[in-house]
Amino acid sequence: MAKRQIEWLMIMSQLLAQLSDRMTSLGLIWFITTQYGEGWLTWYLVVGGLPHLLLAGFSGSWIQKMGALKTIVLADFLRAILFGVSAYFFSETPTSNSLYLIISIIFTANIFSAFFNPAILTLPIELEEEDQIQLLTARLTTITSLTTMVGPILGLICFNRFGIKGLFFTSFLSYLISGACAFQLTKFFKSSEKEKSAVPSKSISLKPVSLMTSLRKNKLIATMLWVFLFMNLFLSPLQVLLPVMAKNIFNNSFNSLAYMEVVFGTGIVFGGILLSLFTIKKRELLWVWGLLLFFSTSYVLFNFQDKLVMNLFFLLMMGVSLGLVNVLIIHLFQERPLPEDVPNVMSLTNLISTASVPFSLTMLAFLQTFLRVEKLGILSSVGLMVMVLLAYFPFSKWGKDVFK
């Protein structure tokens, strides 16, 4: 199988799976909001994030034993079956049982996602040579960012045109094709398995390693996970801050909100595309720290803008630096630990990415009773900058070879 064909199969698998995730999520959120009220959205988010929390310590061990590729294929096909059955049996007429059924469906789907998400980020170290891992990771990460922008739009279009049964059927097809693409990769994996097993640095241990063991022997990675967590938490006020700024600063202009959302998302995608074309091979951790400092500085300055042009400029800078730093962090999570520790690290990365948003928004709702959103945005940006500055010391101590 040609190398270009292998990469396209991986990208198609990631694209369809992540696109289906985003489409289904927004469609179900809209259905619950219109049919049952906003009060149920909190339960939807909590139940949806629960599998990622419960399985964070187990999914890594599973991937170690099964392998990332087999985990991806299995997760995709099981989600295809779930949504295929749901599309057939689900009734378009909403009842009280429909709500519980939807919550059960999303809970089950996210059980499989809790295995798929860390597996797709572990897969490059199984299939690619060391100097190509960063490039492939950048492409997969960029696909995720792109689906975050496009998925909600397609989800609403699909839901409005075909209803929830049509949305489930679309998810069924997407996961089925995604699984088929990943299954095609098993042919390449089998043909190269013997070659890879002869290279210790590329082999995955068959003996499961616990999550805590992985963290104890990787102090730099543990520190970076904390930084990644707080980066996600401190960034969460932005989701509320953008609509508030559009309302209070830019005269209740929906267009300004759309501009801000598009510019920020475009910046993230552009940052990922840059590392899809060019690799950073030296002082990678220093680049991470520098980009985080640039991002946090832009975030601080963004909070003090009252002109739309400058607002969009700093959002673009934030987006590009965030797109770059996400790829570099994920690549260090792949490269620095031993191969058998990578699935554990990726399971925690997945947990932080999925669970930090509902948690931080819940905390934000509580804090809004004491402080205005604008004030919380300033405090979050300053807190992020302080954290980045303090991260210099553990980064330079435990990551000397990729920092100085």
Image (spheres, rainbow, N blue to C red):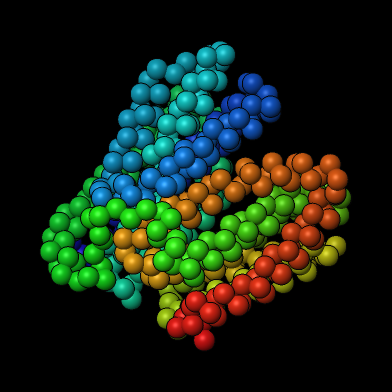
| Nearer the observer, 26 or 228 | 228
Taking 399 as reference, is 16 above or below it?
Answer: above
Residue found at the far bottom of this picture:
404
Q: Quadrant of residue 127?
A: bottom left
- The residue drawn where x is 84% and y is 41% is 369
Q: Using the image, determine if residue 389 lies above or below residue 50.
A: below
Residue 339 spot, x, y in % from top left:
31, 64
Q: Residue at x 36, y 60 (%)?
A: 341
Q: Nearer the viewer, residue 125 or 22?
A: 125
Q: How many marks?
A: 0
Residue 28 vs residue 375, the one in the foreground: 375
> Where residue 403 sits in the image (x, y, percent)?
51, 82
Q: Measuring from the top left, give residue 393's x and y in whole percent.
A: 60, 77
Quarter of the N terminus within the rendering:
bottom left
Left or right of 372 on screen, residue 204: left
Q: Is residue 378 left or right of residue 35?
A: right
Place of residue 124 in the rendered image (x, y in percent of width and height, measured from the top left):
33, 62
Residue at horizontal 51%, vertical 26%? 103
Say whether residue 326 is left or right of residue 256.
left
Q: Is residue 261 visible?
A: no
Residue at 86% from the left image edge and 45% from the top image edge? 370
Q: Quadrant of residue 362?
A: top right
